[in-house]
Image (cartoon, grey):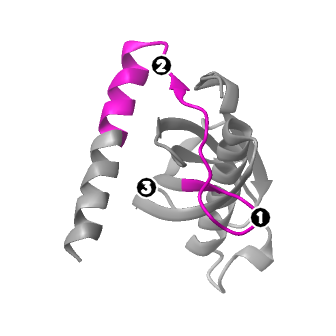
């Protein structure tokens, strides 16, 4: 398997929030945004792995801004770390009131860990991540550290 660059797997999706996405106060449910993030993370990981992927973990999910009915929500993701079968995707969600000229604001951020699987649901190897910049290397190193901490925590029970 050839290494792939961060750029090759980037993805962005958008959705205009509707009443069915919100509570009675007009705030969009966090779960609706998380679903959009999960979808984007799956696209990023599948583009890299060229295999079926599943969500294994969500880390550091942070809500920064509320999202309301009528807002345009844009979710962008890219790989930060790749292990043998797992891939860490950093996601940023921006929110924009399309009736105003205001700039979009960051509403949520998170790291999703996706795992490539075969037809039996077993982890499958994925291509390595080709690092092109110092920033990508720093993100990779941070992702590797999160991965190692998680694995150590799993072993300890």
Residue at point 80%, 69% (across, down) = 18
Q: Is residue 2 above or below residue 80?
A: above
Q: Which residues are magenta?
A: 114-143
Residue 107, x across and y down, in percent: 52, 53
In this rendering, position of residue 81 left or right of residue 8: left
Residue 81, x across and y down, in percent: 45, 38
Residues tagged 1 and 2 counted as in contact (Cβ below 8 A) = no
Closer to the camera in the image, 41 or 83:
83
Residue 150: name its quadrant: bottom left
Closer to the camera in the image, 147 or 79:
147
| Residue found at the very far top of the displayed protein | 133
The residue tagged 1 is: 119
In this rendering, position of residue 147 left or right of residue 7: left
Mark 3 / mark 1, whichever is N-terminal: 3
Q: Is residue 51 above or below residue 66?
A: above
In the rendered image, the quadrant that contains the N terminus is top right
Q: Which mark is residue 131?
A: 2
- Circle 3 — which element? loop
- Circle 1 — which element? loop
Q: Is residue 100 visible?
A: no
Label 3 vs label 1, nearer the camera: 1
Residue 131, x across and y down, in percent: 47, 19
Q: Which mark is residue 74?
A: none
For the residues marked 2 and 3, what is the alpha-carbon distance in whole angstroms?
A: 29 Å
Label 1 vs label 2, nearer the camera: 1
CA neighbours of label 2 inside 10 A, class few (<14), some (14 to 19), many (20+): some
In this rendering, position of residue 71 left or right of residue 89: right
| Residue found at the very far bottom of the displayed protein | 24
The residue tagged 3 is: 64
Closer to the camera in the image, 66 or 60:
60
Residue 152, x across and y down, in percent: 23, 60
């Amino acid at each position: 398997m050839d290494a792939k660059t961060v750029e090759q797997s980037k993805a962005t999706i958008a959705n205009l929030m509707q009443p069915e996405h919100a509570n009675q106060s007009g705030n969009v449910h966090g779960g609706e945004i998380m679903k959009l993030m999960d979808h984007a993370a799956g696209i990023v990981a599948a583009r890299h792995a060229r295999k079926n992927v599943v969500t294994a973990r969500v880390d550091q999910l942070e809500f920064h801004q509320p999202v309301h009915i009528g807002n345009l929500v844009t979710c962008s993701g890219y790989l930060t770390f790749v292990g043998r079968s797992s891939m860490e995707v950093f996601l940023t969600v921006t929110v924009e009131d399309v009736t105003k000229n205001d700039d979009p604001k960051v509403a949520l951020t998170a790291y999703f860990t996706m795992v490539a699987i075969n037809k039996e649901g077993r982890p499958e190897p994925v291509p390595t991540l080709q690092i092109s910049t110092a920033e990508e290397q720093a993100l990779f190193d941070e992702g590797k550290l999160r991965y190692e901490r998680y694995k150590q925590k799993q072993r300890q029970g």
